[in-house]
Amino acid sequence: MRIHLLRHAEAEDRSPSGRDTDRRLTEAGERRMKAVAKAIARLDLGIDLILISPLVRARQTAEPVAEACGYEGELVELEALVPGAEPEDVLHELARRKASSALLVGHMPHLGSLLGRLVSGRDDLDVAMKKASLASFEASPDPSSGRAELRFLLSPRVLEALS
């Protein structure tokens, strides 16, 4: 199984509602995601499942990627991708869904904990991810069973250059 982690792009500091869940991407974040989405499409990751956090900015990050990649499936909201969730929960969900190449769109610190878990097999390592960066792993069909092999970790600037 291939697992791809994508952190949401730049979002507004505060939503009009005042709720964190409603924060939207800024204009700069939307522009960056269009370029990042083109780069992800060029990488030809063969994505057959997109799981997103239920927060607005995660959906806004995933939509241009899905469009650029010709993804015809549903963007599946998953509580296991909210900022305070346990990395193990999303790994069990991935095993249950049996995708061959899944894109997970979420937030720090959760994605940093998940990246650390995949790299080391441990729960006590957090690896920072810049906004709109992409990490890719090769894992066993049950990714919760151990660590995965990091294929790449690309910053948004590198992704924009690839677009």
Image (cartoon, helix red, strand yellow):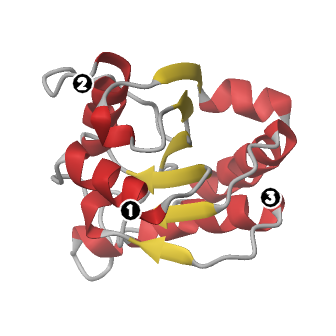
At label 1, the amino acid type is Arg
Q: Is residue 111 above or below residue 18?
A: above
Mark 1 to mark 2 CA distance (whole Å): 25 Å
In-front residue for pair 31/140: 140
Identify the mark nearer the N-term, 1 or 2.
1
- Residue at position x 81%, y 60% in the image: 68
At label 3, the amino acid type is Cys
Residue 132 location (% of width, % of height): 55, 42
Q: Nearer the viewer, mark 1 or mark 3?
A: 1
68 vs 152, left or right, is right
5 vs 159, left or right, is left
**Quadrant in which the C terminus is drawn:** top right
At label 2, the amino acid type is Asp
Identify the mark nearer the N-term, 2 or 3.
3
Residue 24 location (% of width, % of height): 45, 68
Quadrant of residue 143 within the rendered picture: top left
Are dots 2 and 3 in contact, CB under 8 Å?
no
Q: Which residue is mark 2?
A: 126
Q: Which residue is mark 3?
A: 69
Identify the mark nearer the N-term, 1 or 3.
3
Q: Secondary structure at mark 3?
A: helix
In-front residue for pair 58/72: 72
Q: Which mark is residue 96?
A: 1
In-front residue for pair 95/61: 95
24 vs 124, left or right, is right
Q: Residues within 10 Å of mark 3 (few under 14, many from 20)?
A: many
- Residue at position x 49%, y 33% in the image: 139
**Quadrant in which the N terminus is drawn:** top right
- Residue at position x 80%, y 37% in the image: 43
Q: Residues within 10 Å of mark 2 (few under 14, many from 20)?
A: some
Q: Secondary structure at mark 1?
A: helix
